[in-house]
Image (cartoon, rainbow, N blue to C red):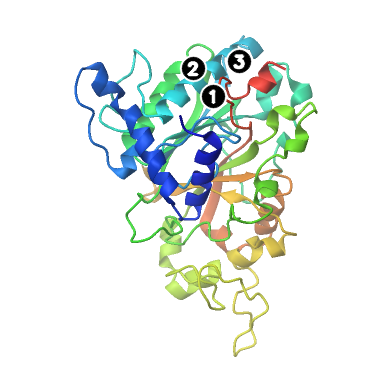
Amino acid sequence: MSDPVRDNDISRRRLLGTVGAGATGLALGAAGGAAAYASAAGEAPPALTTVGATGIAFHGEHQAGITTPLQACGHLIAFDLAPGAGRKEAAALMRRWSALASELMAGRAAGDGDTGVALDAGPSSLTVTFGFGRTFFDRTALVAQRPPELDPLPAFSSDQLDAKRSNGDLWVQIGADDALVAFHALRAIQKAAGDAARVRWQMNGFNRSPGATGKPMTARNLMGQLDGTANPKPSEADFDKRIFVPSETSGTKYDWLAGGSYAVVRRIRMLLDDWERLSLKKQELVIGRRKSDGAPLTGGTETTELALDKTGPDGKLVIPDNAHARISAPEQNGGAAMLRRPFSFHDGIGADGTPDAGLLFVCWQADPLRGFVPVQRKLDRGDALSAFIRHEASGLFAVPGGARTGEYVGQRLLES
């Protein structure tokens, strides 16, 4: 039997690109779950690669999919509870979803009605993460347990939000290193909603496949920039304080959220045609970092601190005052920090001939009013990157802590 705490620690180490020997043991253990289809048919289980065999624990202090390393593909999906559905129906739904996610993340079939889409695959680092939107608490008559951090995000001048693709009662994040495994989980979750909830919106994303580079490295977005360089690291002493709701929440009406986090979700369209017309030098001045390796324009490597006061021979700041890296730097925002964990997206070519592509921005923090909001307000006032992006959808969700063995996600809220 796997140790959820140990499994979670392994996932946190992998976020830094330092997979230890323990991860190998986890992968081998997870491979057994992938044999469910074959054993049912009386066949030998298929051989799995390291990518296919790697499993992430469902149960633990925190939900998977937060500190889990970026996966190759993902789906973000929001649901609204069906008319007439309330707390009882929501509890039954979360119980079904949690049991299903536990099976799928172990590489097992989705019950008797499994579609067979993931027939030959293992868990492939599948994670399924659940969150609650502000309106969920109205629908379930739990307004008294709704934390103030779920107050609506302020409006930003760069917003061009589509209400139909924003917010929602329930939010599910699915990630995996195999596209069929991710799709299989998506279909299973959607079908398990039954009559209790209806899909409000869905977005599909991708990242570079694991093993595609010679060594672990920060992912690139569709602009070609390294994305997530300044992320807080699990090795930092204050990481948990910045990302997870503290255990001191226990004993209050918000104790259901202890060990949880808040996810801000934004669909950010990248105006790639405009961006790609810029010279490399101008692109780097917009960002404040070298495109080749993510190092600050002031020198060093990707992890070198920005020398924000450094000037060039012309007396001008080497990193311009409106550069994205400068404005978003924690030291420029009172230490505000969030864990960026995005997916890229490409949804075809628009009627005007431009790509409908960009970033499914997902960031995690213990308090969005101290994490995302102050940084976005500052970016909104003068970020050079703003001319090349458009915020088209938005959502804020409270993500409960992980389920203990025998529990379902959100049980401490729904059965309080």
- Cα separation between marks 1 and 2: 9 Å
Tell me if residue 306 comes above or below residue 13 in the rendering.
Answer: below
The residue where tag 1 is placed is 79
- In the drawing, does residue 38 fall left or right of residue 241? left
Rendered image: mark on residue 16 = none
Rendered image: mark on residue 91 = 3
Compare residues 18 and 228 and report the one nearer the observer. 18
Farthest residue, direction bottom: 313
- In the drawing, does residue 295 fall left or right of residue 253? left
Name the element at disc 3: helix
Front: mark 1 or 2: 2
Q: What is the three-letter code of the residue carrying label 1?
A: Phe
Q: What is the three-letter code of the residue carrying label 2?
A: Ala
> Circles 1 and 3: CB distance less than 8 Å?
no
The residue where tag 2 is placed is 193
The percent position of residue 359, horizontal first and vertical second, equals 48, 48
Q: Give the residue at x 57% y 71%.
A: 304
Name the element at disc 1: strand
In which quadrant of the rendered view does residue 402 lie? top right
Q: What is the three-letter code of the residue carrying label 3?
A: Ala
